[in-house]
Image (cartoon, grey):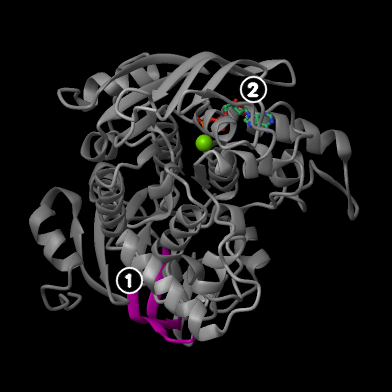
Amino acid sequence: MNESTTPAVRATGISKFFGGIPALDAVDFELAWGEVHALLGENGAGKTTLSNILAGIYRADAGQLLVEGTERDFRNPAQAIEAGIGMVHQHFKLVEPMTVAENIHLGWPETPRIISHRTLVERTRAFMDRIGLHVDPTAKIWQLSVGEQQRVEILRVLARGARVLILDEPTAVLTAHEARELFAVMRQLVAQGLSVIFISHKLNEVLEVSDRVTVLRGGRHVITRPTAGATARELAQLMTGEERELTVEHRDVLGEVVLELRGVSARNHRGLPALHHIDLAVRSGEIMGIAGVSGNGQSELAEVISALRAVDEGRIFIDDRDVTNAAVRAVADLGVGHIPEDRIGVGMVASAPVKDNAVLRHYRSAELSQGITLHRGGVVAFAQHLVDAARVQTRSVHATAGQMSGGNQQRLVARREAMIAERVLIAAHPTRGLDVMASQEVQAAIVDRRDAGCAVVLISDDLDEVLLLADRVAVMYEGRIMGVFDRAAADREHLGLLMGGHEQPVEPA
Ligand SMILES: Nc1ncnc2c1ncn2[C@@H]1O[C@H](COP(=O)(O)OP(=O)(O)O)[C@@H](O)[C@H]1O
Ligand SMILES: [Mg+2]
């Protein structure tokens, strides 16, 4: 077969229904050899569903799938991988207590049954050299950063012989630096003749890394075109079907200090110092943006404020009440909402119904409880209200939360937390992984809370987002506050330098 003319994948008229609702409606998709093909669309557009069909996780209800010119109807992922199609999912499927080498070899057909540890490591190294992608083969998965774990996933799929690699929103969990490294890997793979389907809703990433782009909207195919010559603006319009921009008013008049940290130090989950004598005061009606490269103590900062992490030294006050090392529930009851970075692990119970997740943090409120049991009708009504308000797309509030797309999960958690945040809202990377429209909705909800008098702490590694939303900006680097600036006076270049640790901390006035 001539690989230069037969596409790697040709899907025509693919439809898929869930409970009678079309997730995909007669979609055409073609993947050439040696290309990075971006699949672009808003949350719920059908990107994951299409990929799942290509990867043998779902079966299409209609349409035809040709892989290297041969008609296929995969019944399971094993059949897809046999045909050379492998997918790296939004949530990794690695075995945490095992090593990198062991994970890569799990299910690798060529692995001998009995193999010494040393041979396994050597084989893994040789394989990594061949692909040009490296992670310490002897490291345990739990010891790796998210970016490294993702590399292991990619290696695992390639070890099984995938020539078509599907990456479902791979950058959603990465820092900007890690994302750039991943792009280099993707370019390297297609240079070797493989094909990559890159799923994203981030226009700049699609423009940066892809050769062609296919836009899906509402389960329909909108366009397939070469990426070269496309602009972010026109792709955004194709994605959303409209043109919008969020504008945020900034005010100078500030209220009283609501949240105050005095000399707070804390350790990270590995027991290492993560916060060093943090002083920070956030006022009613302001958004304090915390700028910085991920991993410089921002997560720990969010966690100490919401009482998820113990404070070693220093004090935390909310409305002049000392809440240092108070119970999570007690802090929430004071009106502190937290949109966590890890929304699935911390913000949600994925196996529980949407309605239970909706009331996860409200279960003591009067409308919902009758004594110690929850009033069932109240829960459903409340959940429905939340789902409608946040425009969460779900079949029903009784459906399992984990079945919703990541974007819908994020919307639900964000809106729920905004509702309990009467005094303080901590928003950690609130739009990470969201598409344009959903990002704007979450951002608008944050600004609403500010306007209602909340003290907002916005943590983001996206400086554009910080400068769009924040009234003041604090820069974090290696667990320290490098300086606090009025947004109007903040100089992007200076902030960038501070984020990279290139200047001494500014002494608080
Ligand atoms: N297993 C499922 N059960 C019910 N509905 C689903 C399921 N998977 C996806 N959907 C629905 O199909 C639509 C497309 O979802 P998805 O493919 O995840 O979109 P994307 O990946 O573009 O965000 C959404 O409305 C989603 O709620
Ligand atoms: Mg998806």
Instruction: Judge whether residue 274 is colored magenta.
Output: yes
Residue 64 in picture, x, y percent from top left: 57, 16
| Mark 2 residue type | Ala
Instruction: Judge whether residue 500 is colored magenta.
Output: no
As drawn, which residue projects farthest toward the front? 1
Front one among 141 and 243: 141
Front one among 234 and 457: 234
**Vertically, is 70 above or below 264?**
above
Residue 37 in picture, x, y percent from top left: 34, 32
Front one among 314 and 211: 211
Quadrant in the picture for the C terminus: bottom left
Which of discs 2 and 1 lies nearer the camera? The answer is 2
Q: How many marks?
A: 2
286 relative to 252 in the view: left or right: right
The residue depicted at 27 percent of the width and 35 percent of the height is 210
Quadrant in the picture for the N terminus: top left
Residue 438 in picture, x, y percent from top left: 45, 32
Q: Report crowding for label 2: few under 14, some 14 to 19, many 20 or more residues within 10 A (C-alpha).
A: many
The answer to whether the residue labelled 2 contacts the one labelled 1, judged by CB atoms less than 8 Å apart, is: no
The residue depicted at 73 percent of the width and 15 percent of the height is 20
Q: Which residue is mark 2?
A: 60
Q: Report crowding for label 1: few under 14, some 14 to 19, many 20 or more residues within 10 A (C-alpha).
A: many
**Vertically, is 60 above or below 451?**
above
Q: Which residue is mark 1?
A: 296
N-term-proximal mark, 2 vs 1:
2
Numbered circle sitting on residue 455: none
Mark 2 sits near ligand 1, with its Cβ under 8 Å away: no
Mark 1 sits near ligand 2, with its Cβ under 8 Å away: no
| Mark 1 residue type | Asn
Residue 257 in picture, x, y percent from top left: 38, 62
